[in-house]
Image: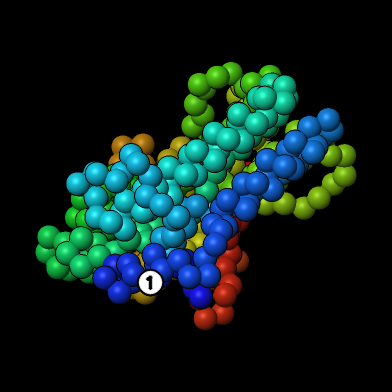
């Protein structure tokens, strides 16, 4: 029994393996959601904290049935329909949580935070559609996310999961590290407000600590964005954030400058994201002093060795993020 999972790329054999229901009586996400809703119901009369690291839409692709919205969508292959159904189920599950909180009369003073741990990844590769290792479907060249960056239109990703940006999970391009962050708190947060604050996932801990009034000191790389949630533009912010990746570390400043490394070639690149979200215009030649300054800050964040920001699957070590505070 393989718990309903199958390998890539998509073939007739992997399709048949995935849909062989022997020993696969119940979908894990269904079990998770049952417990989530039970927990909220049981704790509705007192303060509670629920952390729900859903499996959706992580790969390999696995879903009990294709959603009716996609059954007859001729734009999609079979496995793309299944992946789309996983995304749709996640959306529906979030809706169930919101509806549950509302039905219990605790919606106004309940914070619901939705985010992701990394940028988009593709789990629905298929010959002639999307290839792994990732390959330009127009030219046949493999993407290296340095000189040849992955973009959805050339890589065959019909979902454009990185929102038109370059790169995917594991890279230090924006498509690999930029994620949604949605916070719902009707009693305190103005509906529909959008923030451009520089935030990393390690900011969530100090934020929730401040929300709950934690009175004890603790050590964290994060900076609370509680004030930002309430509309306070004068609250403390990162000057920059630093991320590790499979190709090297990157640093992004509050005003949108970015230095990214490609350690295999001992290379550094400079971009200005407000004018170049797709990271197509490399600016180190035009702004060498800016590159020098940011590289110095990046080196300090990596404790003097850029290789400390290189994720190594053989050693399973990484610097996940070291924010700069000034």
Residue labelled with disc 1: 17
* Residue 171 figure quarter: bottom left
Q: Residue 148: tell me if it is visible.
A: no
Looking at the image, is 254 positioned above or below residue 191?
below
Q: Nearer the viewer, residue 306 or 247?
A: 247
Q: Is residue 143 above or below residue 226?
A: below
Image spot of residue 165 (x, y percent)? 32, 47
Residue lying at the far bottom of the rendered structure? 314
Residue at 81% over, 50% down: 218
Q: Quadrant of the C terminus?
A: top right
Tell me where residue 11 appears, x and y as whole percent. 26, 70
Give how far across and how far down residue 227 sits, in percent.
67, 28
Q: Give x and y (percent) for residue 225.
A: 64, 35
Say whether residue 149 is left or right of residue 47. Answer: left
Most distant residue in the left direction: 139
Q: Residues within 10 Å of mark 1 (few under 14, many from 20)?
A: some
The image shows residue 323, relative to residue 61, as above or below, that is above
């Amino acid at each position: 029994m393989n718990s309903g999972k199958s390998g890539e790329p998509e073939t007739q054999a992997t399709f048949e393996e995935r849909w062989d229901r022997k020993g696969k009586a119940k979908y894990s996400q269904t079990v998770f959601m049952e417990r989530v809703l039970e927990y909220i119901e049981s704790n509705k009369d007192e303060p509670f904290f629920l952390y729900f690291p859903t499996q959706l839409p992580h790969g390999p692709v696995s879903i009990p049935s294709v959603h009716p919205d996609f059954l007859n969508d001729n734009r999609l292959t079979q496995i793309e329909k299944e992946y789309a159904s996983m995304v749709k189920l996640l959306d529906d599950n979030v809706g169930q949580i919101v509806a549950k909180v509302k039905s219990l009369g605790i919606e106004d003073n309940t914070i619901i935070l939705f985010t992701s741990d990394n940028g988009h990844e593709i789990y629905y590769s298929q010959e002639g559609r999307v290839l792994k290792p990732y390959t330009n479907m127009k030219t046949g060249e493999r993407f290296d996310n340095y000189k040849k960056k992955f973009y959805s239109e050339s890589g065959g990703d019909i979902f454009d999961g990185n929102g038109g940006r370059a790169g995917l999970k594991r890279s230090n391009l924006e498509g690999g590290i930029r994620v949604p962050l949605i916070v719902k708190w009707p009693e305190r947060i103005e509906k529909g407000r959008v923030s451009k604050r520089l935030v990393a996932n390690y900011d969530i801990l100090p934020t929730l600590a401040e929300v709950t009034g934690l009175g004890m000191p603790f050590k964290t790389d994060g900076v609370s964005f509680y004030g930002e949630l309430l509309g306070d533009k004068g609250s403390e912010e990162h000057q920059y954030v630093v991320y590790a990746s499979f190709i090297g570390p990157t640093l992004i400043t509050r005003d949108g400058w970015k230095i990214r490394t490609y350690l295999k070639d001992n290379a550094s690149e400079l971009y200005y994201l407000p004018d170049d979200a797709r990271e197509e215009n490399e600016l180190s030649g035009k702004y060498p002093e800016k590159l020098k300054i940011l590289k110095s800050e990046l080196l300090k964040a990596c404790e003097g060795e850029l290789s400390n920001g290189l994720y190594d699957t053989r050693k399973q070590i990484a610097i996940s993020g070291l924010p700069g505070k000034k």
